[in-house]
Amino acid sequence: MIKKLTWLFLALTICCHVAQAQNKKAAKYNNKIIKLQHKVTPDVVSFFRTFEKGSAEDLKMKQAKLIKDFDAAIAKVNAMPDFEGDGELKKAALDWFKLYESSFKKEYDHIIVLVANRDRSKEDHAKLDQMTNELVAREEIVDAQFEAAQTSFVKRHKLEMVEHPLK
């Protein structure tokens, strides 16, 4: 379950930077959003890795940091104007950040309790699996929407996308 979440998050957040762009302003706009995503991703991965052996306190500390980081990213994207009247990428980025921020504020409170209990019952295992499967399904949708918005933005502004894996 944890591996599934971690791999999904890593696979879908290896976002593309724009390189060799004819429209440097559009490339800069895209890259600013991607840099915000890349800033939060290592902490998300660390959070998921803590599931295996971390305590509830460890998870709560990481959760609090992530909520703060996602709130800051949302504020930064909200402060950005649409790019020359084109707001699709900004909206998709906000949806992406808000989904993750919301899940860390709500669902992960319950997930942390279940994960921290190393002697989970069958019912708790089933509940944990159900919750994570529902989260993964929602994340896949918003990740795909962001990817589609970024691809459309790149095409509209005649940019070239180059994949840069997370560091």
Image (cartoon, rainbow, N blue to C red):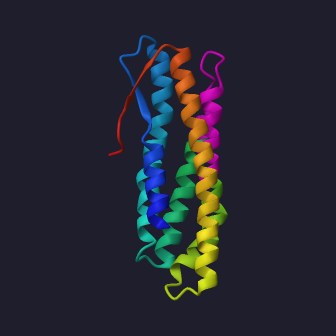
Q: x, y (%) of residue 110?
A: 64, 72
Q: Nearer the viewer, residue 62 or 100?
A: 100
| Magenta residue check for 94 | yes
Question: Residue at the location (58% across, 79% down)?
Answer: 125
In the rendered view, does 36 fall on the left or right side of 83?
Answer: left
Q: Nearer the viewer, residue 106 or 2?
A: 2
Question: Residue at the location (64% across, 52% down)?
Answer: 138
Decide whether the magenta segment is chiefly helix, strand or loop.
Answer: helix
Q: x, y (%) of residue 152?
A: 57, 23
Tally the numbered discs. 0
In this rendering, is residue 138 above or below 60? above
In this rendering, is residue 117 above or below 129? below
In the rendered view, does 17 fall on the left or right side of 111?
Answer: left
Q: Nearer the viewer, residue 96 or 163?
A: 163
In the rendered view, does 83 fall on the left or right side of 14?
Answer: right
Q: Give the residues drawn in magenta, as a range.
A: 75-100
User: Which residue lies most toward the left here?
Assistant: 167
Question: Residue at the location (45% across, 29% down)?
Answer: 31
Q: Nearer the viewer, residue 166 or 75?
A: 166
Question: Residue at the location (43% across, 76% down)?
Answer: 54
Q: x, y (%) of residue 145?
A: 61, 37
In this rendering, is residue 117 above or below 112? below
Q: x, y (%) of residue 113?
A: 59, 78
| Magenta residue check for 27 | no
